[in-house]
Image (cartoon, grey):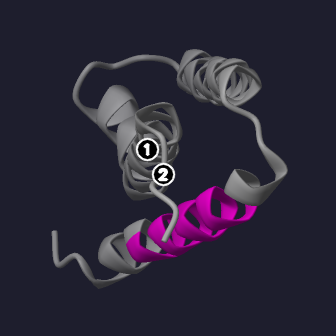
Amino acid sequence: MKIISPRIVLIALCVVVNACVSSALAAVIPIFLVSNLHVSYFRASLLMVVGTLLSAAATYSLGRIGDAARARYPIAIASAICGLAGAMILAFATS
């Protein structure tokens, strides 16, 4: 049995947390900004676009640190599952 390196585990954890938070809060943040903080629609949209781009850049940078062909697939699958879980939580949230 092969032990997974701590570096791969850290990268996978970052990707999983990013996927969960991004998918769960993607619809909530703009509404909160517009209704409670009275930010314009343009600025709320701009924040979401910049946040998405920075998230992609961070994921890419972390991926370059520990990129190994065998490690990519489990990380991608875990990220997709967490993104789906975040979307499901958002869909079934009552308020």
Instruction: State the SS at label 1.
Output: helix
The extreme front residue here reads 1
Task: Say which mark, if any, is on residue 86.
Answer: none
Label 1, residues with CA under 10 Å away: few <14, some 14-19, many ≥20: some
Q: Which residue is mark 2?
A: 4
Give the quadrant of residue 6: top left
The extreme left residue here reads 95
User: Residue 33: image x %, image y %?
Assistant: 35, 27
Residue type of the residue flagged with mark 2: Ile
Q: Is residue 31 above or below residue 83?
A: above
Q: Which residue is mark 1?
A: 9
Query: In the image, what residue occupies the spot 31% across and 75% down?
Result: 89
Q: Is residue 62 above or below residue 22?
A: above
Q: Earlier in the sequence, mark 1 or mark 2?
A: 2
- Is residue 5 or residue 20 the one in the foreground? 5
The extreme right residue here reads 69
Instruction: Check if mark 1's residue and mark 2's residue have beta carbons within 8 Å.
Output: yes
Give the quadrant of residue 68: top right
Instruction: State the SS at label 2.
Output: loop
User: Residue 93: image x %, image y %?
Assistant: 22, 76
| Residue 79 colored in magenta in the image | yes
Residue type of the residue flagged with mark 1: Val
The residue segment tinted magenta is 73-85
Left or right placement of residue 71 versus residue 28 in this view? right
Label 2, residues with CA under 10 Å away: few <14, some 14-19, many ≥20: few
Query: In the image, what residue occupies the spot 39% across and 30% down?
Result: 34
Query: In the image, what residue occupies the spot 40% across and 55% down?
Result: 20
Query: In the image, what residue occupies the spot 68% across and 53% down?
Result: 71
User: Residue 12: image x %, image y %?
Assistant: 50, 46
Q: Is residue 88 above or below residue 1?
A: below
